[in-house]
Amino acid sequence: MNQIIRNRIAALREAMEQAGMDFYMVPTADFHNSEYVDQYFKVREYLSGFTGSNGTLVVSREEAGLWTDGRYFIQAENELEGTGITLFRMLDEGVPTIKEYLRDRMKEGQTLGFDGRVVDTAFGVGLEKVLEEKKIVFAYGKDLADAVWTDRPALPSHPVMVLDEDICGKSAGEKLEDVRRAMEKEGADAFLLSKLDDLMWLFNVRGGDVECNPVALSYAYITGKECFFFLQETEMTEALRAHAVKYGITLKGYEEIVPFLQDRKDKECVLYDGRNTSYALYRTLREKGECRDGKNPTELMKAVKNEVELAHMEQVYLKDSAAVCKFIYWLKKNIGKMKITEVTAAQYLDHLRSEIDGFLDLSFPTISGYKENAAMMHYEATEDNCKELAPEGMLLVDSGGQYMGGTTDVTRTIVLGPVSPEIKEHFTAVAVGMLQLTNARFLYGCTGRNLDILARQPMWDRNIDYKCGTGHGVGYILNVHEGPQGIRWRFTESQTEAVIEAGMDVTNEPGVYMEGSHGIRTENVMVARNGVKNGDGQFMYFDTLTYVPIDREAIDVSCMQPVDIERLNRYHREVYEKIEKYLTEEEREWLADVTSPL
């Protein structure tokens, strides 16, 4: 494989030379800056061999580098070995950013090439500023992958599904009215929307163009009186056409977006979100007339779930939690008695989910990591490269489902046999941190930066950390990662810091990751709620949606305060009360035992 990657990089350099490019940049994105992308867009993976969901490849005539975040350091190091590509560990001390690297490496007047459709405006404009003094030429109109990737898959296309409005809580017409009011406040005449999950939410439709993410490749252009929805002709169903007529939505071909923007005669001030609009579309807008970079109003509207959505989510999470409980029971009962691998364990859990009413798909491929493999946060076992489980150590399983009524995300680290005192201490610290955040009371106006320390403090007390955020929003029958809300102590340029609003859901997932030894994560999903309001302000708290036991076999009570023990016992009592009705008698007896008080 290493030689294959070297050959592909060599072919890319040949294409660069023919196109007159000195450097070429390949991010991990589609035309909408989506986090997860279809096979058609996995150019960076094809060229580098690195399979993580986040990374950017930069290639020059002399060298090649790949930038990724802390979730993937171990994985990237393994996958890049022998390829000649240097790993740049983002946010590590002394490691240059991509912009700094290009500023320092590129010579005056050289050409930087990239496909402007897969680079977001915010990053592209930032590059313009950093490279302006060197008079760098931007060649953003050509995708060199077409010259190198000879058997590239076709652009994905799947029929769009129109959701029943009873499950959405708000019609597409009502949502469009909300958007137009937000446009008016911003002083915008038109709004270009490129973010796929926002588009699906706005129109109450779902697609299938990205694995595990029910979205369709599309754009929208909205004015005070008109609404245009651009998507592939092959995705337009009769139900969608009727839906569009009902709400005054004009359907247009996906490929028509650039000619449409170029042909607009009205002198409109167009609102767009530079984080999620491609650099190529931004250049089209800028050449046409006035445009304004601002946050998509749809992002916040989508993130604050309405009461209809929350009611459906509560039911979905109980059924999903029950499936995870059944899985843990099965695993504990059968470990050492039958052959179980990381892959077959994941397949069994996936099967349990598939039997739940309203199941549509997984919300992401199930992560199943045994012992040291769990130290890689986004490890992916395959049938020809996986560990067999044994009655020792721990298995980390991070999983979720898409249902007609919600999207789930849950992680548990399960004891299969003896574990060391150090592992127990780490496991207990993670549980304590998760429960501290669960029980937070905070004033309205707080962001995730204010709350992160509650989850992270037990790890920091031990001089260890996890190189990722503590929490992210979760979509409603949509993407498993959703903004603008997030819980983290540091927000980088691409990450939004947003006030926690009542109705926002957020994950709570502290962890410990020791390379070559073990990985631990405990993850629940919570919903922010308004609590007491008094002269000091609006106080808030979290309601929990996930009810799965935390493995007491790895709990070291000596590492807990009385309040920690009380919180774990209370959570376990709620787990039993809410889940027992979904279980068999044998499973119920097991759950009663594993949730009994410490």
Image (cartoon, grey):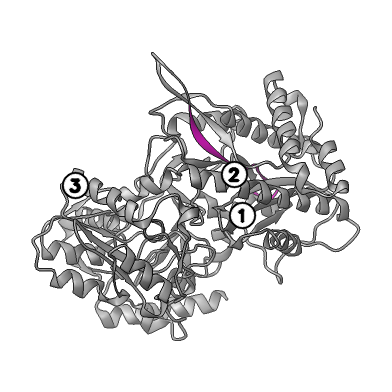
Question: What residue did someone put label 3 on?
Answer: 184
Percent x, y of residue 111: 23, 69
Which residue is farthest bottom?
150
Which of discs 1 and 3 lies nearer the camera? The answer is 3
Q: Is residue 17 left or right of residue 513?
A: left
Of the two numbered discs 1 and 2 in the rendering, the one whose residue sits closer to the viewer: 2
What is the x, y in percent for residue 508? 57, 39
Q: Is residue 152 magenta?
A: no
In screen coordinates, is 309 left or right of 515?
left
**Residue at (19, 59) in percent of width and height:** 225
Mark 3 nearby-residue class (10 Å; few <14, some 14–19, many ≥20) = few
Against 415, residue 151 (above or below) is below
Residue 114: in sight, yes or no? no
Provide residue 519's location: percent of width, then percent of height: 67, 46
Residue 419 place in picture, x, y as percent: 80, 42
The structure residue drawn at horizontal position 56% and vertical position 37%, both measured from the top left corner, is: 465
Q: Which residue is mark 2?
A: 314
Q: Name which residue lies at 25% across and 57% down.
A: 127
Start-end of magenta stretch: 515-530
Q: Earlier in the sequence, mark 3 or mark 2?
A: 3
Residue on which disc 1 sits? 400
Q: Is residue 480 above or below residue 438?
A: below
Q: Amino acid at mark 3?
A: Glu
Q: Secondary structure at mark 3?
A: helix
